[in-house]
Image (tube, grey):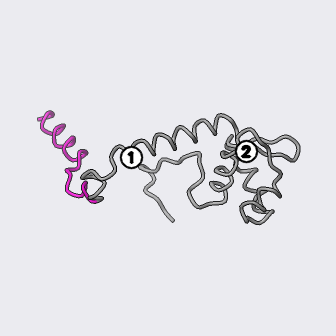
Amino acid sequence: MPVEFESYHPTNLPNENTNGRCILEFLAEEPDLGFRAGEIAEELGIPRGSVGTTLSRLESRGLVRHKGEYWAINPEAYDAHMASLIGLETVAMQFEGDYYDENPDWDDDLPDLDEKEQESRSTENK
């Protein structure tokens, strides 16, 4: 699927509902334990071959680490993961039920600030 290139901001975390995200969340539940790829596959119902490939990809992003045949979440990734979850939950709880939560299209009629800035610059240059 194509994206608007200039406004696209990739994240280091895998997208939701992917094997990568499922594995990361599983490992984050027990950050002090290491698991074999087969154990992860069995626990999550993901094919063993997919788990191995996904773990290698996650390791290249610095999200997981391994010793021998055991894999664990990278402590730094775990800290960032937990901080983002706590932050999102806090914001969601704080603003749950407010006008913006109840009206998802609240920003449809806002002016385009880029257009306003361009108008301002063209007025200044005259």
Along the viewing direction, whichever of 108 and 91 lies nearer the viewer: 91
Along the viewing direction, whichever of 89 and 49 lies nearer the viewer: 89
Instruction: Confirm or deny contact between disc 1 and disc 2 (CB under 8 A).
Output: no
Residue depicted at 77% across the width and 56% down the height: 40
Give the mark nearest the N terminus, 1 or 2.
2
Q: Secondary structure at mark 1?
A: helix
In the figure, 123 relative to 92: above or below? above
Query: Residue 77 at x, y = what percent?
Result: 63, 39
Quadrant of residue 103 within the rendered picture:
bottom left
For the residues carrying marks 1 and 2, which lies nearer the camera in this image?
Answer: 1
Along the viewing direction, whichever of 19 and 59 lies nearer the viewer: 19
The three-letter amino acid code for the residue at tag 2 is: Glu
The magenta stretch is: 105-126
Q: Which residue is mark 1?
A: 93
Query: Residue 41 at x, y = what percent?
Result: 77, 60
Query: Residue 78 at x, y = what percent?
Result: 63, 39
Query: Dividing the image into 4 quarters, which one contains the C terminus?
Result: top left
Along the viewing direction, whichever of 69 and 5 lies nearer the viewer: 69
In the figure, is residue 65 to the left or right of 115? right
Q: Around disc 2, counting alpha carbons within 10 Å, would you say few (fewer than 14), some (14 to 19), or many (20 or more)?
A: some
Residue depicted at 52% across the width and 48% down the height: 10
Query: Residue 91 at x, y = what percent?
Result: 39, 43
Question: Any magenta on residue 108?
Answer: yes
Quadrant of residue 106 within the rendered picture:
bottom left
Q: Secondary structure at mark 2?
A: helix
Q: Which residue is mark 2?
A: 59
Residue depicted at 64% across the width and 50% down the height: 25
Residue depicted at 46% across the width and 59% down the height: 3
Question: Any magenta on residue 117?
Answer: yes
